């Protein structure tokens, strides 16, 4: 799930839906209908190559049980099953998925996205409508909004969209409904891919939900709005168009956003709406196979994962709470709480599932009380231990603090040592050896972490605690670990982190265990009875921590394959493994002091580590895989680019052309070179320092993530539909300002780059909210896209300028990206792409880049 607004009371800034009223009237022979057409009447499809407005249609939503049982992975792999006419059918949903992906890549602005996909959705909705019952009223609208907004994602940039497409369907009781829950998927895809998991599978599920619930005789209490979103891959543009402009958006009180990260896997609630715990409660009640954790939410909110979804738009521009698990949709649509959501505002909520069986959820304020009580009890216990007997209080405190410091020192030493291993692996070019073979990461970094921890404490036992009683040491180091967790619990609770519940588990259960078997702690040697009772007492926190570890690695492994060239993924993963090793070992450190020797364990761990390191260095673990069941591809983007740099007089002072290559992970192109020898480090791309964003045609402002790229010389390209860029006017403004107005015509995707010259400053523009948002590095980035039949793009920028500006006031560059059609790939680009191995996902397109000085 995604973050929600700070209140469940829904307030909208803008209303008026922007339908495309400039479309020509329907032909006499078309099946055009009106919004008031009776159920069963034919609905219009969008004729190629034009896109026309469509009338009202029918839609519905899914039953709670059926839907929860179909995860993305199950739908992609599940064999056909027999389903009744009112049951959710995975085979029917798979049919929808196959038909959507058969259209091919559905890039915004392409006929495949704007016409074929929309036609298919309308056709299925029309068929579903014909078989629906009379319990509901169904409406459909084809929205084509135009708008602009700024977003702090990827370092910050501004987005502008024109005439993009949303297919919006509303199911409501026959007498209407004041409130609604929104379900969102997106049918567009990135270039060169059919976008099965991201996100056609969610649209297929939504269509089957339509089919299933449209046949129900049971009326819903609230409306359900299904948004088939046609421009999510353009960084959330279509969701912004809906939530800020569509007339139905005013009624939305909560939403479920269906999105993918990687391929396959279980449905995960990874963000919910803060201040709205009733949404989590809905999931707790409704979901049959829950998979949810507030830990995932706080990790996602931290920005560690370089990704975002439509949730951000619904949160920031609509103040609407909610997100990702479909099973709650019907529950919300029949819930009294939806209409009075403001009455159920009770702050944040702590939630986590137990092995996918059920979810525990409680208000964060309750969690805060529980956390402080638990920490207080633990500190009271530790204080009592230190003060007994009183004459030895100072001695006891000294021993406890020594054990506390030694434990922290062992953690720091372990972290440093394992990160050094990860750095070495990265430097020698063996990063991501675990990407396809995840067990390698455990064998390499997990064994190194465990061995280092044991080594530090073994040396401390041998030299520092040479003549100290073993039982006493075991007791002291248990208390030291309890002290660390108690402090962590208090600090995390004070910071307002809901994830502090983990610390509660690691304080409460060990403390109870200690109190139950305190006599065994004083007996000589670690007896079988003691070990069994100790393990049983620790079972709950250890089991949950292993489960949580698996969940986190499930989330992060796909991300590491596209995290950029600057972040060493092995160091990130090694850091996580060390953290989990420290957590899992925290209450077993005392056993190092209780047992006679740990040499055998240390030797075994070291042997596994050394053997794995040798194998990794040899390159036996190839990072990438083309396995259809578990693909781990190397992502490479190639742009056949022609660049022209103009001076203040408009003269071309420099031009070149080549295929610009970006590898999306830390390994760069080292694995590609053996297959395509001309792509090597001799053609590294130089930075054009005088130009914004190094004079390179970035489709998004990710320059800070991909500083290693390559530029293979290639012939100049001549698009059949070249960009037209015009300066319309230069107008003096008050306060030493100048306004420059421009007109741009070009392909569906363009990038605008702005850098004020020395002495000038960009103060305002006609984009977003009017206030320019700089990207990382200080330049300004605007992402532009349009659907079909968009008018030329007009915008202005206003700069404060010095009295003398003989060398210009602003450098402005425009890149045109040809993602589809006859201009997409040159013969040279086609030929190069054909040579890439099958374990790569190589996406290519053509683009032009022009830099101007004004």
Image (cartoon, helix red, strand yellow):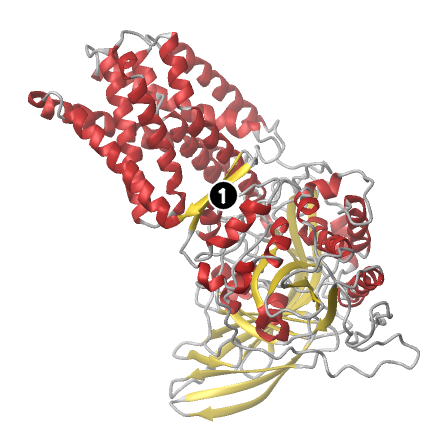
Residue that appears at 38% across and 88% down: 803
- The answer to whether residue 490 is above or below residue 220 is above
Q: Nearer the viewer, residue 98 or 830?
A: 98
Q: Nearer the viewer, residue 853 or 23?
A: 23
86 left or right of 801 in image:
right
342 left or right of 830 in image:
left
575 left or right of 113 in image:
left
Residue, far right: 29
| Residue 275, image x, y percentages | 43, 58
| Residue 127, image x, y percentages | 84, 61
- The answer to whether residue 132 is above or below residue 81 is below
- The answer to whether residue 831 is above or below residue 155 is above
Q: Nearer the viewer, residue 550 or 150?
A: 550
| Residue 674, image x, y percentages | 67, 39
Question: Secondary structure under badge 1?
Answer: loop
Residue 36 appears anywhere in the view: yes
Residue that appears at 62% across and 34% down: 436
Residue 240 appears anywhere in the view: no
Location of mark 1 (residue): 293
Q: Quadrant of residue 401?
A: top left
Number of marks in the image?
Answer: 1
For mark 1, does the 10 Å Cα neighbourhood hold few (<14), some (14 to 19), or many (20 or more) residues? many
Q: Quadrant of residue 514?
A: top left
| Residue 108, image x, y percentages | 70, 65
């Amino acid at each position: 799930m995604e973050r929600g607004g700070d209140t469940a009371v829904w307030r909208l800034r803008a209303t008026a839906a922007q339908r495309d009223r400039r479309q020509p009237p329907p032909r006499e022979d078309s099946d055009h209908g009106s919004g008031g057409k009776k159920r069963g009447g034919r609905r219009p499809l969008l004729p190629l190559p034009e896109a026309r407005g469509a009338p009202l249609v029918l839609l519905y939503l899914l039953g709670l049980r059926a839907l929860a049982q179909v995860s993305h992975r199950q739908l992609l792999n599940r064999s056909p099953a027999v389903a009744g006419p009112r049951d959710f059918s995975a085979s029917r949903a798979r049919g929808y998925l196959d038909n959507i992906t058969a259209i091919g890549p559905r890039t915004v602005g392409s006929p495949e996205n704007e016409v074929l996909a929309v036609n298919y959705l309308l056709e299925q909705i029309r068929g579903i409508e014909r078989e629906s019952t009379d319990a509901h009223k169904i409406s459909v609208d084809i929205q084509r909004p135009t708008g602009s907004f700024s977003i702090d994602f990827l370092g910050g940039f501004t987005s502008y969209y024109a005439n993009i497409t949303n297919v919006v369907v509303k199911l409501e009781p026959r007498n209407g409904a004041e409130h609604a829950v929104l379900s969102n998927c997106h049918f567009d895809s990135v270039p060169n891919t059919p976008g099965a998991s991201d996100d056609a599978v969610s649209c297929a599920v939504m269509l089957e939900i339509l089919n299933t619930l449209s046949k129900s005789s049971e009326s819903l209490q609230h409306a359900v709005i299904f948004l088939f979103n046609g421009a999510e891959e353009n960084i959330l543009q279509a969701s912004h168009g809906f939530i800020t402009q569509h007339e139905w958006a005013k009624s939305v009180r909560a939403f479920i956003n269906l999105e993918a990260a990687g391929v396959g896997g279980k449905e995960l609630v990874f963000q919910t709406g803060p201040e709205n715990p009733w949404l989590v409660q809905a999931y707790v009640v409704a979901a049959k196979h829950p998979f949810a954790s507030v830990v995932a939410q706080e990790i996602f909110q931290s920005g560690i994962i370089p990704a975002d979804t439509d949730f951000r738009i619904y949160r920031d521009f609509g103040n609407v709470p909610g997100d990702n698990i479909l099973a709650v949709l019907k529950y919300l649509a029949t819930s009294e709480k939806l209409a009075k959501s403001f009455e159920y505002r009770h702050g944040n909520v702590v939630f986590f599932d137990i092995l996918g069986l059920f979810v525990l959820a409680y208000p964060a304020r309750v969690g805060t009380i529980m956390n402080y009580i638990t920490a207080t009890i633990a500190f009271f216990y530790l204080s009592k231990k230190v003060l007994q007997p009183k004459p030895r209080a100072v001695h006891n405190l000294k021993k406890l603090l020594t054990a506390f410091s030694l434990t922290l020192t062992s953690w720091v030493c372990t972290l440093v040592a394992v990160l050094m291993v990860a750095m070495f692996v990265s430097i020698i070019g063996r990063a991501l050896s675990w990407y396809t073979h995840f067990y390698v990461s455990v064998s390499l970094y997990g064994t190194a972490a465990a061995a280092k921890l044991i080594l530090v404490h073994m040396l401390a036992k041998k030299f520092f605690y040479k003549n100290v009683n073993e039982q006493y040491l075991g007791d002291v180091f248990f208390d030291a670990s309890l002290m660390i967790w108690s402090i962590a619990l208090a600090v995390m609770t004070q910071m307002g982190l809901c994830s502090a519940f983990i610390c509660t588990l690691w304080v409460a259960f060990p403390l109870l265990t200690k109190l139950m078997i305190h006599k065994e702690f004083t007996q000589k040697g670690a007896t079988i009875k003691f070990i069994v009772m100790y393990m049983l007492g620790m079972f709950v926190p250890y089991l949950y921590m292993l489960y949580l570890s698996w969940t986190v690695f499930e989330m992060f492994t796909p991300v590491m394959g596209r995290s950029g060239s600057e972040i060493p993924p092995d160091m990130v993963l090694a850091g996580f493994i060390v953290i989990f090793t420290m957590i899992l070992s925290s209450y077993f450190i005392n056993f190092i002091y209780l047992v006679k020797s740990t040499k055998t364990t240390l030797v075994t761990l070291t042997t596994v580590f050394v053997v794995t390191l040798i194998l990794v260095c040899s390159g036996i673990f190839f990072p990438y895989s083309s396995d259809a069941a578990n693909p781990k591809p190397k992502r490479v983007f190639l742009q056949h680019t022609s660049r022209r740099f103009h001076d203040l007089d408009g003269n071309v002072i420099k031009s070149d052309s080549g295929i610009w290559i970006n590898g999306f992970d830390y390994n760069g192109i080292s694995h590609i070179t053996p297959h395509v020898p001309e792509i090597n480090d001799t053609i590294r791309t130089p930075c054009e320092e005088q130009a914004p964003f190094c004079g390179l045609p970035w489709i998004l402002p990710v320059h800070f993530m991909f500083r290693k790229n390559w530029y293979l010389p290639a012939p100049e390209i001549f698009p059949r539909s070249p960009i037209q860029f015009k300066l319309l006017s230069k107008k003096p403004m008050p306060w030493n300002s100048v306004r420059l107005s421009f007109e741009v015509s070009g392909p569906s995707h363009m990038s605008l780059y702005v850098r004020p010259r020395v002495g000038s400053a960009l103060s305002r523009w006609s984009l977003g909210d009017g206030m320019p948002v700089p990207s990382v590095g200080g330049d300004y980035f605007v992402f532009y896209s349009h659907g079909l039949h968009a008018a030329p793009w007009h915008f202005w920028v206003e700069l404060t300028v010095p009295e003398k500006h003989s060398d210009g006031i602003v450098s402005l560059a425009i890149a045109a990206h040809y993602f589809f059609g006859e201009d997409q790939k040159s013969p040279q680009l086609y030929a190069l792409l054909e040579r890439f191995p099958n374990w790569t996902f190589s996406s290519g397109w053509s683009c032009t880049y022009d830099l101007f000085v004004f």
